[in-house]
Amino acid sequence: MRESYKKSLGPNVDVGLDYCTQMSMSPEKAEIFKSMENWANQNLLPLLKPAKECWQPQDFLPDPTSEGFHEQVQEIRARTREIPDEYYVVLVGDMITEEALPTYQSRLNGTMVFHDQTGFDQTPWAIWGRGWSAEEKRHGDLLNKYLYLSGRVDMKQIEITTQYLIGSGIDIGTGNNPYHWTIYTSFQERATAISHGNTAKLARQHGDTKLAQICGIIASDEKRHENAYSKIADKLFELDPNDMVLAFADMMRRKISMPAHFMYDGYDHNLFQHFSNVASRIGVYTATDYREILEHLVAKWNVDKLTGLSSEGREAQEYVCGLAQRIERLEERARTKAQKAPPISFSWIFDGQV
């Protein structure tokens, strides 16, 4: 089954095991996380919100039990009618990324320390993982229903893409290493917040204030989740700066892959790249955003001020601190590539080209 997915996703998918996938947790590393449990209870778990205090998708959708339900649906269709197709391509890609939550939960559960062996472990790491997943699930649910009611997209093709994506899994280079995981999630959650924030701005420009509110409220969740993961990383930099800077450099050398990079709709073997080109072209997520996230994390974690590092640690520090400048030199090339990419047909919008 895995091989068939690999074939369907094209020749560029690399699922080879690397050293961090095979890494075992040393007793010293396990002790670091054990010593952090009180810290996590006090600093991490408060960032979760009880269900009764959270927004729910139905807060933003027509009430199917009300007499005015059909009129409310028609209002959604009227608001979304003039929004351009390229916006829907990006919104659908963002929604599918959110809908692949089962993959992310299993990846988290396969990460040492964060794993939940019984399904109801009471470590702060397991409690966080379940709570984070519960909050994230609302994002895909809300976007899915709004897109369905808009009538602007091919829901069956979207559902097929989501099934392929969950079935194909994820290969982001973190392995079961919790240091790599916290670096990745700190970066990726911020990237997701930026993406949703920019779709909110564009929705407002296109006249759909309700959709702008939806994308904005999802972005605020992602910012809170970014805060949680970056706090964990910050604490690990305090306790084990050498191995954390090595993990940071390792993840950046691999490049941070977005979690939907195995996206496939049954037709387009380069669907994620084509979606990414459109997202860059309309300013939702660009190479500049990537560079600015890196700069933000380097500054937040005071990477340039780390001391007492090994020779390998100092080399990693130098690499990470100089990387943003190298990326900046490539930004214009990336922008030009996205802008000049030829129109591509997307099954999500009934094979329309953008």
Image (tube, helix red, strand yellow):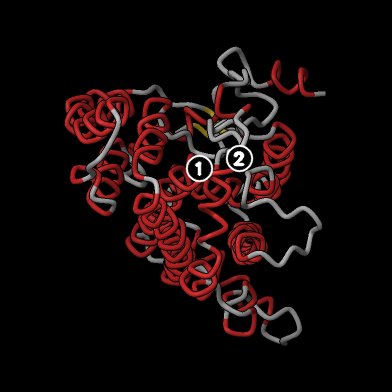
Residue type for callout 2: Trp
* Residue 286 screen position, x and y as percent: 32, 39
Quadrant of image for the N terminus: top right
Residue shown at 60% from the left, 12% from the top: 11
Residue shown at 75% from the left, 35% from the top: 167
Q: Helix, strand, or loop for circle 1?
A: helix
- Mark 1: give few (<14), some (14-19) or many (20+) Cα within 10 Å: many
Above or below — where is 173 with respect to 203? above
Residue shown at 72% from the left, 34% from the top: 164
Q: Are marks 1 and 2 in contact (CB under 8 Å)?
A: yes
* Residue 3 screen position, x and y as percent: 76, 18
Q: Distance from label 1 to label 2 (Cα)?
A: 7 Å
In this view, the residue farthest toward the top is 11
Residue shown at 45% from the left, 62% from the top: 228
Q: Helix, strand, or loop for circle 2?
A: helix
Mark on residue 348?
2
Based on the displayed image, in which of its 4 quarters is residue 17 positioned? top right
* Residue 92 screen position, x and y as percent: 55, 47
Quadrant of image for the C terminus: top left
* Residue 226 screen position, x and y as percent: 43, 58
Residue marked by disc 1: 89
